[in-house]
Amino acid sequence: MARKQLLKAINRVSILNVIKSHGPIARTDIAERTGLSPATVTGLTAELIEDGLVQIKQEGDSRGGRRPILLALDSRGAYVVGIKLAEEHATLALTDLNAEVVTRRTVQLGERDPEHVSHLLADSVRGLLRAAGINQGHLLGVGVGLAGIIDPQTGLCRVSPHNGWRDVPFAKLLEDELGCIVYLDNNVNTLTRIEQLYGVGQHVRDFLVITIGRGIGMGIVANGQVYRGAHGGGGEFGHMVIDPDGLVCGCGNQGCLETFVAEPWLLHRARERGLDVAEADDLIAAAQAGNAVALEVLAGAGRVLGQAMASVVNLLNPRLIIISGEGVRAGDFMFAPMREAAYRHMFAQLAEDVEIRIEPLSDDTWARGAASLVLGKLFSLPELEPSLG
Ligand SMILES: [Zn+2]
């Protein structure tokens, strides 16, 4: 990108971020916060208004003199679709620019041929737009999150265990079907992005998102950027080795963190000790009823998780850890022992820096996270990571 264009893109994004974070806001205040000249702010805000991203909200207080015109994000000026590809089904959510869900649907995936899946999803996206009465011209793009190793730069799905895909250019397939931009990322990174853009991770430069459910995942934000590693495979917290002689994990190694904390393994451990449980809710109900095996299985998982977290805190010194995912239902049965173990094993100084928050996950969160892949591009620069305005 030519230097002049790049400067313009930087200025436009920094103005948009100030309007998102501080709107309704007067142009003079935008100039002050961004350090840009009033003429630059006037020119670029006119463009943003024309693009439908910013609207004139209201007039400010009058204390004599001219009333300033205030600008705000036009959250319904454009839309995005977020898709979470799960094992059996996909959840789609149409959201506005604030990542608020306008409408949603779930589709069963059936066969996993990539062409079939992209065709099915494209049909569903069009159906969603029709149901909401939104013209496809107002769709900024589509974000897709799925488990596996993803290269978000190229939209290549390197490995997707659920789908049996290897090196599938899935973003390109769906783009060809839909004729709009499609971004692809690991689903834990999509949750991390929504926390960073709209959630408790806003304005936090260093934080972790740990997801607990059928597997254990980790999103890492370091110095304001999602850390992905050399080829998008970073953050495999679930496969940190806890016991080299332990149970054989799905990845083929022994004694990974998942074999202590992930739901299928909790059930396995409870059954081994004679407790008849079919699913995680049964285990939680047994703990609520005071069953000693259920209580010990959940507490034991919490202690191991806390120890592993302490190692990561000592390594990365995050300011905030967000624990999310379906597994947060276990509540204090797991997370009280987890906190205790985590803080006990952290370096004292680092423990003072870090806050641990448990965030319940709604059905929409994963799909909103996928939508934030597109929204994130709107509020950040090409090839650069988001401004933390
Ligand atoms: Zn493993």
Image (spheres, rainbow, N blue to C red):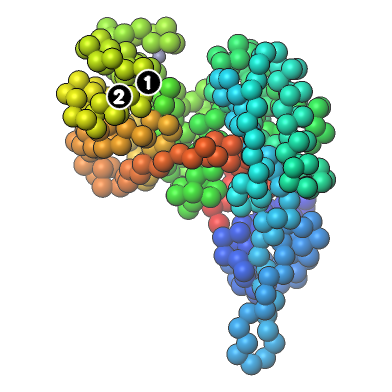
| Residue 193 shows in this picture | no
Three-letter amino acid code at disc 1? Glu
Q: Nearer the viewer, residue 386 or 157?
A: 157
The residue at 35%/7% (across/down) is 248
Callouts 1 and 2 close, C-beta under 8 Å = yes
Indicate the secondary structure of the residue bearing disc 1: loop
Q: In which image quadrant can residue 215 be found?
A: top left
Q: In which image quadrant can residue 237 be found?
A: top left
Label 1 C-beta lies within 8 Å of the nearest ligand 1 atom: no
Q: Nearer the viewer, residue 4 or 63?
A: 63
Residues at marks 1 and 2, CA–CA distance in whole angstroms:
7 Å
Disc 1 residue crowd, few under 14, some 14–19, many 20+, Cα 10 Å = few
Indicate the secondary structure of the residue bearing disc 2: helix
Q: Is residue 347 above or below residue 261?
A: below
Could you tell me residue 210's position as x and y percent? 41, 33
Disc 2 residue crowd, few under 14, some 14–19, many 20+, Cα 10 Å = many
Q: Is residue 32 above or below residue 221?
A: below
Q: Which residue is mark 1?
A: 279
The residue at 55%/14% (across/down) is 161
Quadrant of the image containing the N terminus? top right
The residue at 30%/24% (across/down) is 283
Q: Which residue is mark 2?
A: 283
Q: Nearer the viewer, residue 344 or 109?
A: 109
The residue at 77%/52% (across/down) is 4
Q: Hey, which residue is sitting farthest bottom in the picture?
A: 64
Q: In which image quadrant can residue 38 be found?
A: bottom right
Could you tell me residue 3's position as x and y percent? 75, 49
